Image (cartoon, helix red, strand yellow):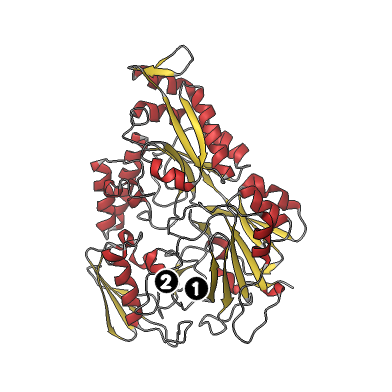
Amino acid sequence: MRLVRRAAVLPLTLALLTAAACSAPTPPAGSAPQQDDTFVIALSAEFESLNPMLGYSPDGGSLIYDGLMSRAADLSMQPALASAAPTTAEDGKTVTFTLRDGVKFHDGRPLTSADVEYTYETMLDPKSSSPIAGDYAAIKEVEAPDATTVVFKLAYPYAPLVQRTTLGIVPKGSPLEGTPPGTGPYRFGAWTPGDKVTFSANAEYWGGAPAIKNVVVAFAEDDNVRATRMKAGEFDATILPPKVAAPFRTETGVKVYDVASADYRGIMFPMKEPVTGDLAVRKAFSLAMDRQAMVDTILAGAGVPAFGPLPTESEWNNPEVTGAGASDTAAAGKVLDEAGWKPGPDGVRVKDGKRAEFTLMYPAGDSLRKELALAAASDATKVGLDVKPAGLDWDAIEPRMSKDALMMGWGSPFDPDYINYELFHSKYAGKGYFNPGLYDNPKVDEALDKARESGDKATRKAAYAEFQKLIFDDHTWSFLVFLKHVYVVRGDWVGPTPGVDAHEHATGGLFRDLHTWKPAA
């Protein structure tokens, strides 16, 4: 999902967590579900909200809500609450949808265009402070001329508009607080903070009643804890780092799915600090990274080296943004020497009395980021950079992001406007997890704005190629690896269809069509 999620859930006692994960959700009146009617998914991070207007699952994968359009495993856009693909005016600035007939919200209210209008306008209202409002900046107005017609009026021909209409729709008048009813395959049950959220099947779902009658989404931040509890049978599915998932590949009754993704891990540098603000330090650091060794060892082969934010498979990738998988310590040393960073008595480089040292933060419960941070620090030592890894919780990380480097994770296989605009445009500098390193390059801003506001694909492609080259030359980040997402699922199911995951997948990714899953036997 697109919402920025913070893995700041405090661990509970194992006994409490076990009881919570295994308990069935509160059943609807008149039903008495059995334990085998319940499917338990374990995630590493808790939702910050289940309200689409505040950024819950805008890219699809919500259990509760539907958008006007949905995204298939092959990334193609399919009608959901819309009855068909929209029509677009010749100037690209008016996009019209017609709603599907007979759709009802979970509380029985019929879906109308007024609900769509309200959802988008409330999300866009500055008073809502929605973290995703910037993604929809092209929208000037949403109109509902009749009960089944929705018209988007755009400020410019925004090419990814249709892709953005996966945002879940809520009833008109829904508050920002709480979880409004949706139209999706599951109804919201209850949320126990720090523990779980429960859902029950919507038997009247317009897309067909789900075979899985109850879903529990449990939260367990630590990768090894999730693996242990998955092994013990407490969870039916989870997502694990490749090495942690390895033992499940030979376990009877469990299937492991290796899913392609555009999800990368890389190091964000604070640009205003004296050490990481020096281009020579950032370039030398990146040259020193042995990315192929990280893929082979830490990812157990489930990934590829990364040198920029778009994978080589993307049609938007700039092939000039590349490098060697192995480290080049000689080149890194030369860069530092020429910039005046000379080895000190302990081997750490010094310039103008300043040691080449900085802290590299990572979320403590994320074993993959920890291993990558330790490997990066070790590689950096070989060229005289003293990098100090620090495992912290997200509440401790967030206020330090403009001062200390951070092992980040982002990436999307959708239109390149997704997340890149927020991560690298100066207007987002210092806004939470968007551009936390305070990067500011007017040429990058110009390229991102040009690509966002053009309806011509060739123009957009050239602008994104320029953007990628600029951040590559600036070494704004040290991109390390693209991951494969490894899902561990108990039982034999008909329905799971691997696609190409984004960084934030939660109940999207392999689970995006959970309502269509059926037992194989």
User: Residue drawn at (40%, 74%), measured in percent from left and top?
Assistant: 169
User: Residue 371 location, x and y as percent?
Assistant: 57, 38
Secondary structure found at label 2? loop
- In this rendering, the answer to whether 192 lies above or below 287 is below
Question: Decide: marks 2, 1 in contact (CB < 8 A)?
Answer: yes
Q: Quadrant of the C terminus?
A: bottom right
Spatial CA distance of label 2 from label 1 is 8 Å
User: Residue drawn at (36%, 68%), measured in percent from left and top?
Assistant: 162
Residue 499 is left or right of residue 448, and the answer is right
Q: Foreground: 415 or 56?
A: 56
- In this rendering, the answer to whether 382 lies above or below 136 is above
- Name of the residue lying farthest toward the right: 252
User: Residue 328 location, x and y as percent?
Assistant: 48, 25
Q: Which quarter of the figure has residue 134? A: bottom left
Q: Earlier in the sequence, mark 2 or mark 1?
A: 1
Q: Which quarter of the figure has residue 91? A: bottom left
Q: Amino acid at mark 1?
A: Ile
- In this rendering, the answer to whether 269 lies above or below 6 is above
Q: Is residue 30 visible in this depiction of the protein?
A: yes
**Which mark identifies residue 64?**
1
User: Residue 172 location, x and y as percent?
Assistant: 35, 80
The crowd level at tag 2 (other Cα within 10 Å; few <14, some 14-19, many 20+) is many
The crowd level at tag 1 (other Cα within 10 Å; few <14, some 14-19, many 20+) is many
User: Residue drawn at (32%, 39%), measured in percent from left and top?
Assistant: 470
Q: Foreground: 256 or 225?
A: 225
Q: Is residue 341 visible in this depiction of the protein?
A: no
Q: Foreground: 324 or 178?
A: 178
**Which mark identifies residue 168?**
2
**Which mark identifies residue 7?**
none
